[in-house]
Image (spheres, helix red, strand yellow):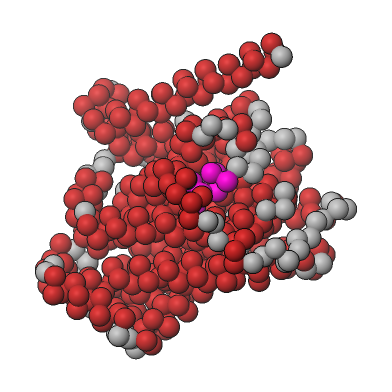
């Protein structure tokens, strides 16, 4: 792209007020879909596509990208306020975001989540604009050994999200991995643990499990809690919500590191934002001077999760635009939206339609700014949800949870599955078992099993294939280092506790 085409693309965005309003609307819709349990950015983008048919190319794609960015950021709202993640990746945000709300810091948590999402999106946008073709070529060269190693790396951080008891965390993680085996064998096609049910042939719905494990237990606990706190709106001023720039600068390494992790994971097809959030959270905890406060309301946990979540957005757009390979489910729908408007992603797109590419890049930046502004000025409205009478709020949440689980596939079985996981989650939370490792095991278990077995077949039955794949070996060595360092750290703490 030449300088002239870049300027032309930028001007095509800012000289079109109607287009900017559509992007603003897209971000607002995305925030709503992201915040409501059971709904998702993918669903939001799919529903908005028909409205873009009469729009210009750049405006249409900008609107869809607005829904995408808003949807990913919006998941933090319900995760922080009511401990019910709006999106799978915001599970990690709830680990420290909700404790901050319980400590009377809801506005601060939402403010930092907003700006962390903004910085994560901006950093990934910079990489999207500068080195997207190079990064896409590197990460789309991943094969089964690399995917298996990446999944193993993700599973190695279960201890980091296990809370006080590593044993209970490991049990929860193993339960999640076991549940991931339900369905059709990825290699031989045999049915496993389906108990004769056709509905389980495709495996357990991650969204249904997520809603059940987080929504239902939280709602039941809220009904049983006699002292449901209400948050005053007196301190919800722009000054208190917007983090001072000096504080943001102090936490720059956490923001940048998390955004880069999110961007890298986003580029890898089918990796997903939840993996990025867990990895970023683990790294933030390891580099923190107060690792023991994670899970109790540590701001760095919220920052890491949200910066990586939105870092995935820009990262996932890289392989989609350069190689026509969607990085996640949302960009898969976006790919369809591009083609509907006569835009065929790929290497030739940058040479044949540079003005449109420049316009799309500009729309990503504009959508990010709108996302931050809408959240900053809407936080007062978000926090007011906590002042709704508990019985009414819980009834609404139950309805949203069940409707959301049904809307994913239009299956009543998923509603039953949500209720089943809700009961399991309630019993486990009462026993002190963390929910995050179950989600991590469920998401990564099937990925690790399938890719590991494929890698072994590629190696003619030998695991030595990993030794000849540098990227895979890198992930494996890092995972081993993480496990060893976690064991040593826990042993030191236990020894220190005994001495005291």
Foreground residue, 298 or 359? Answer: 298
Please tell me which residue is depicted at 67% across the width and 65% down the height of the picture.
236
Residue at (61, 27) in percent of width and height: 166
The quarter holding residue 494 reads top right
Residue closest to the eye, 355 or 108: 108
At x 41%, y 23%, the residue is 481
- Please indicate whether residue 255 sits to the left or right of residue 360 in the image: right
Q: Please state, as top left, top right, bottom left or bottom right, where the C terminus lies in the image.
A: top right
The answer to whether 430 appears left or right of 142 in the picture is right
Kindly indicate the quadrant of the structure image that contains residue 80: bottom right
The answer to whether residue 445 is left or right of residue 172 is left
Q: Position of residue 411 (x, y in %)?
A: 58, 63
Q: Which residues are magenta?
A: 299-306
* Residue 38 vertical placement versus 488 (above, below): below
Does the magenta run of residues contain 303?
Answer: yes
- The majority secondary structure of the magenta stretch comes to helix
Return the residue found at the far front.
Answer: 246
Q: Residue furthest top?
A: 499
């Amino acid at each position: 792209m030449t300088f002239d085409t870049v300027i032309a693309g930028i001007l095509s965005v800012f000289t079109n007020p109607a287009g900017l309003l559509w992007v603003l609307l897209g971000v607002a819709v995305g925030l709503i879909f992201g915040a409501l349990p059971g709904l998702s950015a993918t669903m939001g983008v799919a529903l908005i596509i028909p409205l873009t048919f009469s729009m210009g190319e750049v405006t249409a794609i900008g609107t869809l990208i607005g829904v995408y960015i808003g949807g990913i950021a919006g998941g933090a709202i319900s995760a922080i306020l009511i401990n019910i993640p709006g999106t799978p990746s915001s599970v990690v945000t709830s680990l420290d975001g909700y404790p901050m709300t319980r400590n009377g810091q809801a506005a601060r948590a939402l403010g930092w989540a907003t700006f962390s999402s903004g910085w994560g999106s901006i950093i990934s946008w910079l990489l999207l604009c500068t080195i997207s073709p190079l990064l896409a070529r590197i990460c789309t060269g991943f094969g089964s050994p690399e995917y298996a190693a990446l999944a193993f790396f993700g599973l190695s951080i279960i201890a980091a999200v296990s809370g006080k008891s590593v044993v209970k965390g490991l049990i929860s993680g193993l339960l999640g991995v076991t549940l991931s085996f339900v369905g059709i064998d990825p290699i031989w096609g045999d049915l496993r643990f389906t108990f004769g049910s056709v509905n389980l042939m495709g495996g357990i719905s991650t969204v249904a499990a997520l809603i059940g494990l987080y929504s239902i237990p939280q709602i039941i606990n809220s009904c049983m809690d006699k002292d449901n706190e209400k948050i005053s709106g007196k301190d919800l001023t722009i000054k208190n919500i917007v983090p001072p720039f000096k504080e943001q600068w102090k936490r720059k390494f956490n923001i940048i590191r998390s955004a880069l992790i999110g961007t890298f994971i986003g580029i890898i097809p089918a990796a997903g934002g939840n993996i990025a959030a867990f990895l970023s959270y683990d790294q933030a905890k390891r580099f923190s001077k107060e690792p023991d406060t994670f899970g109790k309301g540590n701001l760095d946990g919220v920052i890491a999760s949200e910066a990586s979540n939105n870092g995935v957005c820009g990262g996932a757009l890289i392989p989609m635009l350069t190689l026509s390979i969607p990085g996640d489910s949302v960009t898969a729908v976006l790919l369809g939206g591009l083609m509907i408007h006569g835009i065929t992603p790929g290497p030739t797109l940058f040479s044949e339609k540079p003005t449109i590419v420049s316009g799309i890049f500009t729309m990503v930046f504009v959508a990010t700014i709108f996302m931050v502004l809408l959240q900053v000025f809407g936080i007062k409205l978000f926090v007011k949800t906590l002042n709704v009478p508990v019985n009414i709020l819980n009834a609404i949440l139950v309805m949203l949870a069940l409707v959301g689980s049904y809307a994913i596939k239009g299956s009543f079985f998923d509603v039953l599955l949500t209720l089943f996981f809700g009961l399991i989650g309630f019993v486990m939370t009462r026993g002190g078992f963390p929910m995050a490792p179950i989600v991590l095991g469920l998401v990564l278990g099937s990925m690790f099993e399938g890719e590991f077995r494929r890698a072994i077949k590629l190696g003619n039955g030998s695991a030595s294939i990993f030794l000849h794949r540098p990227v895979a070996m890198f992930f494996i060595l890092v995972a081993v280092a993480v496990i060893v360092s976690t064991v040593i750290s826990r042993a030191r703490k236990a020894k220190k506790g005994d001495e005291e």
